[in-house]
Amino acid sequence: MCGIIGFIGDENATPIILKGLRRMEYRGYDSAGLSIRTNEGLRVIKSVGKVNDLANVQDLKAISGYTGLGHTRWATHGKVNLENAHPLSSCAGEMSVVHNGIISNFQTLKKELEKEGHTFKSSTDSEVIIHLFEKYFENGKGIKDALLKTVNRLEGSFAFAIMLRDEENIVGARCGTPLILGIGKSGSFLTSDILGFIEFTDKAIFLENKEIVVLGKHQFEISDFEGNLVAKEVTQVAWEFGTPTKEKYSHFTLKEILEQPRALERVLSQDQEQVDLFCKKLKTMAKVVITGSGTSYHAGLYAKYIMRDKAKISCDVVVSSEFNSQDVDHDTSVLVLSQSGETADALRATQIAKDAGCQVLSIVNVVGSSLARESDISLPLKCGPEVGVAATKSFTSQLALIYLIASRMGIGDDNMLASIPQKVESVLREAERIEKMVSGYTEARDFYYIARSIHISIALEGALKMKELSYIHAEGMAAGELKHGPLALITQGTPVVVINPTDDTYQETLDNALELKARGAKVIGISTVSNEVYDDFIPIPKVHPSLSPIIEVVPLQLIAYYAAVKMGQDPDYPRNLAKSVTVN
Ligand code: F6R
């Protein structure tokens, strides 16, 4: 949930680390900090807030050194304040650590270390790492020995990097959360994400779980937690995935919503052989269980309708945080959906599936992510970095790829997909109208979204976008459920978004819209045809009902985005959230 970076090289580490932190800010933006190895010792500078706040700290410009660590935090243990911001230091201040993950046995370790005379300055779980390392380093057996002793005492999930005043090298370890080595011409990197170093090098080495690294300027040594050396391959990562800028747009979120037509074109240009292999694997098992979190779970709901109703595959969908061994057996294929490929709940579900002997198939955006690497087969979303915390282009890409897979399994026509980017383009042309419309709803305290059948996934997704971006309470539901309780919430002026394409769900959903209107709701219709029941209407083009969700969600993303902007929220960095949720 946090972003960590270490750099050791021939150039001033301060600006390099700041750049890396800016790119990894999506991982957490409660506080940020860096530690630089200078001639006067380790200089640690931290600030509460975003990386920009750190960059504006007066002293920072004057600090230079060739080795450094940086951190951008999403708080789990301990309040958001300077003491708890990373890097965290050893008792004597001669060592610094940056950590991502959770050390679950930190209380026991802290008590032990305090008894031995260590003084803690923060209320984080992470601080035990640096005190443990300090304790073992005092044995005088060197940094690798101290690192091995440290990692073997830690429980939980972690990726961390440590830097010392009196040692050339940086050390790092990975157990459960990502850590990637970047091998550049002017130095080496250790980061949570390729984005942390992509501007400087495209050569990456992915550490596996339970591996440590001792990193020099131009050399490295990777071992397992027993200390045995491990040979690794260098992966060349694609440059085009590494240059996310807002360009002319005010927010990444808007840019990413607007670039969906291009993203959809890219996701459809899959390697045919891989898609065929994927489909073959999916078909061989008696049952498919789909899992994912948040928006990816909503894509899973869509997939369930497509696979179950069209392909007649016995299919279920389970939200990853609730996935357990009862959901699968050995003749199940598990399909895991994730933009980041690092979501802890999705990775836990993957492990449960693997332990049960299931084959794991995944659809992932981030190349080289843990999920992609742990799956039997994985297809890429190819939508480029999604920096806005709210998933937008990754969602429509997930839906398009799911449909492509389904149609290759013989249950649809993938030719129909070809026109989807252009249809999405036509909805995006409504952006200005949607923006104006949203101005009429910023006083609303609640928003409801209703739909039927395969479109329910979009009602849920529309509501999720609204709550996370604008902080307005929102609920998505099956239209037929209104009469079983939620209708009681409808009062004069309550906005309800009715997703109502002209398929076999049309008439019943329209009837629900009329019921809502009779009870005072302000009905916002998303449909291929207008109707007088709608107070506001956003037209969408008519496409096959199974493809319509890809189109329907676009106006809902825009509604949520403009609501956030009009209410003064920063849609790129919603409060309390982070892009990849690497804790359970
Ligand atoms: C919502 C959102 C989250 C993610 C969820 C899963 O806009 O972004 O709900 O969808 O945290 O993330 P991934 O897909 O990376 O596993």
Image (cartoon, helix red, strand yellow):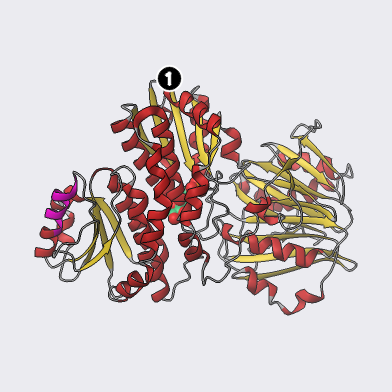
- Tag 1 residue: 331
Q: State the residue at coordinates (9%, 64%).
A: 518
Classified by dominant secondary structure, the portion drawn in magenta counts as helix
Q: State the residue at coordinates (57%, 64%).
A: 29
| Residue 16 seen in the figure | yes
**Place of residue 85 in the rendered image (x, y in percent of width and height, measured from the top left):** 64, 64
| Residue 391 seen in the figure | no
Mark 1, secondary structure of its residue:
loop
- Sort mark 1 into few (<14), some (14-19) or many (20+) by Cα contacts within 10 Å: some
Answer with left or right where residue 261 lies relative to residue 444: right
Answer with left or right where residue 126 lies relative to residue 485: right
Residue nearer the viewer, 395 or 18: 395
Residue 545 placement: quadrant: top left
Q: Magenta part of the protein: which range?
A: 505-513
Answer with left or right where residue 268 lies relative to residue 204: left
Magenta residue check for 528: no
Magenta residue check for 510: yes
Q: State the residue at coordinates (40%, 39%).
A: 415
Answer with left or right where residue 62 lies relative to residue 395: right
Residue 316 placement: quadrant: top left
Q: State the residue at coordinates (27%, 61%).
A: 539
The three-letter code of the residue at mark 1 reads Asp
Residue farthest to the bottom?
58
